[in-house]
Image (cartoon, grey):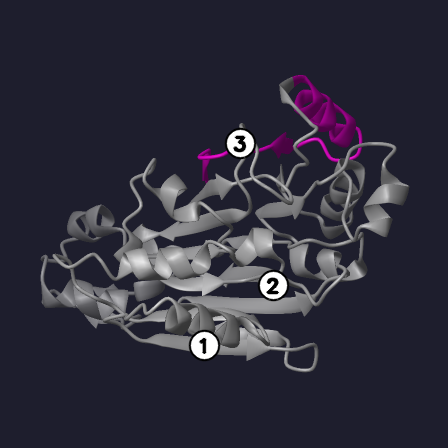
Amino acid sequence: MELQFLGTGAGQPAKQRNVSSLVLKLLDEINEVWMFDCGEGTQRQILETTIKPRKIKKIFITHLHGDHIFGLPGFLASRAFQASEEQTDLDIYGPVGIKSYVLTSLKISGSRLPYKIHFHEFDEKSLGKIMETDKFLVYAERLAHTIFCMGYRVVQKDLEGTLDAEALKAVGVPFGPLFGKIKNGQNITLEDGTIIYAKDFISAPKKGKIITIIGDTRKTSASVKLAQDADVLIHESTYGKGDERIARNHGHSTNMQAAQIAHDAGAKRLLLNHVSARFLGRDCRQMEKDAATIFENVKVVRDLEEVII
């Protein structure tokens, strides 16, 4: 499981940072990639990565400001050009209006897609658990931006315990169907009468990962709810220490506020993105240092940076 940041800037493209987009790579888990927001130029950023557009099966949009959606029609059209590869359907989750925006853009531009898009639109009355598969759950809550904006909590369901094959061989269990029975929790009896108890050869279930992606927002308790015990919290940091007033006026957060959210939620790791273009390299290092006074495990991410979870 990996994160890759395609755009980490706020508002408009800059030399060092493109606008908002990131992907959650679930290739080992379900052979899919999930995208969160798709700002202008996202498809160009993808060309600098190993990401295959056809692997992107779900797109989650936090809100309808341009720096989070202007790249979406272009990406969808380009995904259709993968003529030599299998065309697969796509799910788009986001606020009410995302379906109209996408379909209107495609219609006016004469774009025809050889795959289907399944839209899932939400307002403040339809949030909570918005998606469930056999391996993942996704929750959404309303944040506190200047327009309706959502934050997402991706929860990997607990992983089944693993079978200790070497230990089974050591006690005389032949490889084959009996291994499968034990893996399914069935006790077995060997030819010599020895009873093999499945629980003794299967490890305890492994806790699944939790990844929280916070869209544009003022400091709000909804962020703490979404980030509770998260392995990774990705939080916007448009402004720095001392900018609390301007951050609130523009519906954004500072690095210090993001750090407080991570602390209050008991998150394990904080990644700051959606950074104003006025913060350059030295400024970003200072943002990290300042935030670390509240929450130690913090980093300001860069465009194209990959993070293993």
Secondary element under disc 2, as helix, strand or loop, is loop
Position in image of residue 55 (x %, y %): 29, 56
Label 2 near label 1: C-beta < 8 Å?
Answer: no
Three-letter amino acid code at disc 2?
Answer: Leu
Q: Nearer the viewer, residue 175 or 255?
A: 255
Compared with 41, 162 (above or below) is below
Three-letter amino acid code at disc 1?
Answer: Phe
Q: Which residues are magenta?
A: 282-309
Badge 2: residue crowd in 10 Å (few <14, some 14–19, many ≥20):
some
Residue at the location (62% across, 62% down)? 63
Badge 1: residue crowd in 10 Å (few <14, some 14–19, many ≥20):
some
Residue at the location (11% across, 68% down)? 177
Which of the two marks, 2 or 3, is nearer to us in this view?
Answer: 2
- Is residue 205 shown to the viewer in this render? no
Which of the two marks, 1 or 2, is nearer to us in this view?
Answer: 2
Measured Cα–Cα span from mark 2 to mark 3: 23 Å
Determine which quarter of the picture holds residue 182.
bottom left
Residue 300 magenta = yes
Checking the image for residue 119, the label placed there is 1
Residue at the location (73% across, 27% down)? 287
